[in-house]
Image (tube, rainbow, N blue to C red):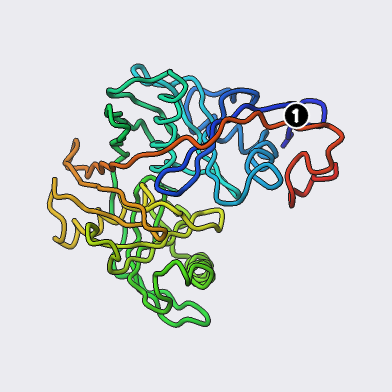
């Protein structure tokens, strides 16, 4: 597949950075060639096949760091939507991204492109809604969440048997209460090693989401530290970094598992604390055909506006670690 060559690679890309409960989002405003396609899935496939080097260059060191989630804005594909969004990270692409959507809304507000009210966006996994309040709070309505399998046991080399639920919240999650490693910030490196081992074991043992969907997010639930939270989590993201926020799609999937067990009624609030201490408040409503629709409330803050420059003479133009770094 062709990737942008030295000649066609953009000289600059303009971005706005924000964080949502600690997790960074980098919204790409211009400089990135618009992907063709009538659907967001087709556009994502195009970016993956042709512009993947740009994904890495925009997020990787020396211009970024591994935790950043990128959001490429495109024209909408659905009547009534304001824009399309392709979310990506240090390793791959996401279906949806809850913290990222909150970051996009606050970024567009910062740029004067959005005022308080409701807005829709198209993503590769469906159209989502967001409501911006005057105080900067954003409530998103995610794609439907569901539980694919409950109490799935996986043997994790070095850690033993781990049991969890496989659930969809816009990405595939394995959600467990496994207590081999305490869910504390001081243990974040050990948690990352543990959850990467779970992710590898799921893959090695052929455990997937529906239609073979790769379970690329691992979520560990534990008792909260905050008095105003119901649960604290650690979430390993698909690129191998951990989510600093309570994870919007992870909270969506978690609420679906609780509902399936009769532990969360429709409309009841679920206050999800993240590993660095941020909070999302979520709840479920019933959608068409009994679908479970997750709602997540939180906020984001703009942290910077940058024009990333890609000098053709720069040996690290494509990012440190990119296989073409010295092309
Ligand atoms: O908030 O959905 C989320 C998310 C996914 C990966 C990082 N954040």
Q: Quadrant of residue 260?
A: bottom left
Numbered marks: total: 1
Say left or right for 59 vs 155: right
Residue at left offset 83%, top offset 38% = 314
Viewer-nearest residue: 62 or 302:
302
Image quadrant where one finds the N terminus: top right
Residue at left offset 27%, top offset 29% = 133
Using the image, determine if residue 294 lies above or below residue 108: below
Q: In which quarter of the image is residue 208?
A: bottom left
Say left or right for 152 vs 199: left
Using the image, determine if residue 118 lies above or below residue 259: above
Residue at left offset 31%, top offset 39% = 142
Viewer-nearest residue: 317 or 136:
136
Q: In which quarter of the image is residue 62?
A: top right
- Secondary structure under tag 1 reads loop
Q: Position of residue 38 (x, y in %)?
A: 49, 22
Q: Position of residue 295 (x, y in %)?
A: 25, 41
Viewer-nearest residue: 125 or 159:
159
Is the residue indicated by label 1 positioned so its CB lies within 8 Å of ligand 1? no
Residue at left offset 44%, top offset 32% = 104
Image quadrant where one finds the C terminus: top right
Using the image, determine if residue 245 lies above or below residue 127: below
Q: Where is residue 140 in the image (x, y as percent from the top left)?
A: 30, 36
How many C-alpha atoms fall within 10 Å of the one at disc 1: few (<14), some, or many (≥20)?
many
The residue at which mark 1 appears reads as 9
Q: Where is residue 185 in the image (x, y as percent from the top left)?
A: 45, 66
Say left or right for 37 vs 97: right
């Amino acid at each position: 597949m062709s990737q942008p060559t030295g000649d066609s690679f953009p000289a600059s890309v303009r971005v706005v950075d924000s964080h949502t409960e600690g997790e960074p989002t980098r919204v790409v405003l211009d400089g990135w060639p618009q992907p063709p396609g009538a659907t967001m899935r087709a556009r994502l496939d195009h970016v993956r096949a042709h512009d993947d080097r740009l994904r890495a260059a925009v997020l990787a060191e020396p211009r970024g760091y591994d935790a950043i989630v990128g959001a490429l804005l495109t024209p909408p594909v659905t009547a009534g939507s304001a824009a399309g969004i392709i979310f990506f990270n240090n390793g791959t692409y996401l279906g949806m991204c809850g913290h990222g959507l909150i970051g996009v809304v606050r970024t567009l507000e910062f740029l004067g492109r959005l005022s308080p009210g409701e807005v829709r966006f198209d993503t590769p996994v469906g159209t989502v809604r967001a409501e911006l309040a005057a105080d900067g709070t954003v409530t998103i309505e995610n794609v439907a969440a569901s539980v694919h399998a409950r109490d799935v046991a996986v043997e994790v080399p070095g850690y033993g048997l781990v049991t969890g639920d496989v659930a969809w919240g816009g990405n595939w999650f394995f959600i467990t209460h496994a207590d081999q490693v305490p869910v504390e910030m001081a243990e974040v490196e050990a948690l990352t090693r543990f959850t990467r081992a779970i992710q590898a074991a799921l893959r090695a043992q052929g455990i997937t989401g529906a239609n073979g969907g790769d379970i690329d997010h691992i979520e560990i639930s534990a008792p909260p530290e905050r008095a105003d939270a119901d649960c604290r989590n650690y979430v390993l993201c698909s690129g191998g970094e951990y989510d600093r926020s309570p994870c919007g799609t992870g909270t969506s999937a978690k609420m679906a598992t609780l509902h399936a067990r009769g532990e969360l009624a429709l409309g009841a609030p679920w206050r999800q604390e993240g590993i660095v201490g941020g909070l999302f408040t979520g709840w479920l409503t019933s959608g068409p055909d009994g679908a479970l629709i997750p709602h997540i409330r939180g906020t984001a803050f703009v942290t910077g506006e940058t024009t990333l420059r890609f000098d053709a003479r720069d040996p690290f133009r494509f990012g440190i670690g990119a296989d073409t770094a010295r092309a």
